[in-house]
Image (tube, rainbow, N blue to C red):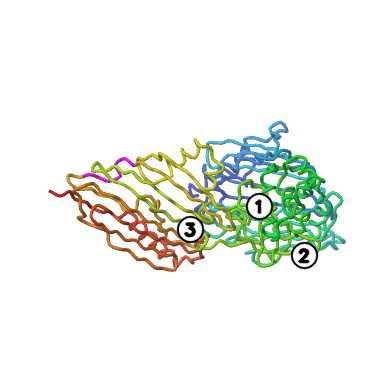
Amino acid sequence: MKIATLIIVSLLSSPFLQAQDYSSLFIPDSLRKGADLIKREEEYILTIKSAAKFTISEKHVYSILNSAAANYASYQAYYDKFSSLNNLSGRLFDKWGKQLKHTKKGDWKDYSAYDGFSLLSDARYKSNEFFSADYPFTVEYEEEADFNGTQGFPRWIPQSRPGMSVQSSRFTIIAPANYKVRFKQLNFPGEPLITQKGDVKTYVWEVKNLVAKKYEPSAPPFTELTPVVLFAPSTFEVQGFAGDMSTWEGYGKFMYQLIKDRDVLPAEVKNKVHELTDGLKDDREKSLVLYDYLQKNTRYISIQLGIGGWQPFEAAYVAEKKYGDCKALSNYMIALLKEAGIKGNYIEIYGGSTPPPFVSDFSFSQANHVIACVPLAKDTLWLECTSQTASGGYLGSFTGNRKALLIDEKGGQLVNTPLYTIKDNLQQRVVQATLDSEGNLMADIHSRYTGLQQELAHSLMHDASKKEREEYLNRMINLPTYQVVKNSYEEEKGRVPSIKETLQVSVTNYATVTGKRLFIAANIFGSASTKMPADTARKYDYLVKNAYREMDSATIKIPPSYSAESLPKDVLLNSKFGKYTSSVKVDADKITYYRIMEQYSGRYPPTEYSDLVKFHDQVYKADRSKIVLVKGE
């Protein structure tokens, strides 16, 4: 008998091997390759009891191979006014499958699910965390929870991250036979197994042996690359409010129930609306004046209590308290507009710079935020009601370029928010600098940013303290030693806002001094900071989300008696990924430099990745080209 066989037989007969299935020895090599984490076993059982009640049982077993997946040793179980936890357990196993620990009731700590900005919330969670320095080890968690209110069901994503292999994952729905189970399969091969016994129908989805996927920068969302099944109710009920989510129209009608008749304003606010708008004739102008009033007289505070997680506080409440969450402030803005004779709309949307892909042909809640909009004769005015500084009409990277749900008395209607193109996203920089014979540089930088390009400057202007702004500015430029001596900002609001930034910068040893020569980079402040990694084995498309244009010009006064010995050649790069031009001239005591960089948005297949890397390598090299100045006799 071979030695390896003897070892396995010995292990199988060992009395301490209490859970041999959890031994890391039994993980196939194919699942280990490229993995930090093995999902050994996962099961969800969703039992739909009625339009208002359901139960979910969960079991999760992870073998954690290294510290990159150490966070999976912890578990959080959430609950709130509409849900209760019936059972929680956790077990820890070593690499051999020996149980090291089983959680007791006191091991589970109870916390408020405070998000850092909500004033009030009834969301809570229980948490446990196992620790082991001896990799690999395995954790098992089980949970059961009851839900009173069926506005949404969990989605099933067996393989939720790069570096995760899946040995087995299953999702089961048990429902009355006459209940319409709605689901949407993405990248899932085949159909669910459906069986019926009496008046109960069971649906089962299962996957096995999914090998780990490699992380690739700027890849498509992971939900495009791996099996996903979305679930949503048909008829449902939440705290006495009933609806049918089978269509966007039906879902919108349910949401309209929650906002209807909550737009009544106090008399003093009504009077203020007329004082501000009665002398104006244009609805856009009226809307912007009222938006300015909203910004100056309210502030954002999140409140998540019961049905209030979906239903806005009444307009009168916001008028009195001077605060509200996104729902309440948007509803208040719509009430102000209504008093001025202008129709505003309530918009459900996903807020964030990297929203998940929107599934248009499957109606269910895909939002975490609410904004308002005003349909005008020629266009639509979009209003972010939680910001006290945003330009009226500008949504930017937080809610721009995505689908949203417009809700009114007719129900729900999908709409698109504005896309910010290369014409909108500009950076124009003019530099006037003086170089001394020691290689030190003094520069005045005048920059104008528009669209998405102005968002950082907007944050520095409005959100950062003077100290925070100065600290950031003194580490943002890709130079070894410099100091921003002065800074100032000027903003012009609009549908595509712009900000003018003025900096005075002192740079020590900007030029390298070697004997009678100075080596200087003409591109002072706008060079590409990093190179793209080469990847000949790339598997996934490369996504470039935003397009932009940078236009830089610099005039550098050089020290007396110096002249150009060597100049970079003019560069012109033109590709499907973008465009780049640069040129350098020296005339008497002055260097003049011009640069234009354009990035195009797009989705590029892996076969084009090497060309994309080549383009950016050429830009990187051109941005770092040197001028050689030599001192005359």
The alpha-carbon separation of the residues under discs 1 and 3 comes to 22 Å
User: Is label 2 in a helix, a strand or a loop?
Assistant: loop
Which image quadrant for residue 380? Answer: bottom right
Q: Nearer the viewer, residue 605 or 411?
A: 411
Q: Amino acid at mark 3?
A: Leu
**Residue 49 appears in the figure:** no
Other-residue count near label 3 (Cα within 10 Å), few / some / many at <14 / 14–19 / ≥20: many
Q: In the image, which is nearer the foreground, mark 1 or mark 2?
A: 1
Side (left or right) of 294 relative to 430: right
The alpha-carbon separation of the residues under discs 1 and 2 comes to 26 Å
Res 426 label = 3
Whole-percent x, y for residue 327 in the image: 73, 49
Q: Nearer the viewer, residue 317 or 155?
A: 317
User: Is label 3 in a helix, a strand or a loop?
Assistant: strand
Res 247 label = 2
Report if the CB atoms under discs 3 and 2 are less than 8 Å apart.
Answer: no
Q: How many marks?
A: 3
Other-residue count near label 1 (Cα within 10 Å), few / some / many at <14 / 14–19 / ≥20: many
Whole-percent x, y for residue 128 in the image: 66, 37
Whole-percent x, y for residue 386 in the image: 67, 47
Whole-percent x, y for residue 482 in the image: 36, 40
Q: Is residue 165 magenta?
A: no
The alpha-carbon separation of the residues under discs 3 and 2 comes to 40 Å
The residue identified by callout 1 is: 384
| Magenta stretch, residue numbers | 507-513
Q: Amino acid at mark 2?
A: Thr
Side (left or right) of 14 relative to 308: left
Q: Amino acid at mark 1?
A: Glu
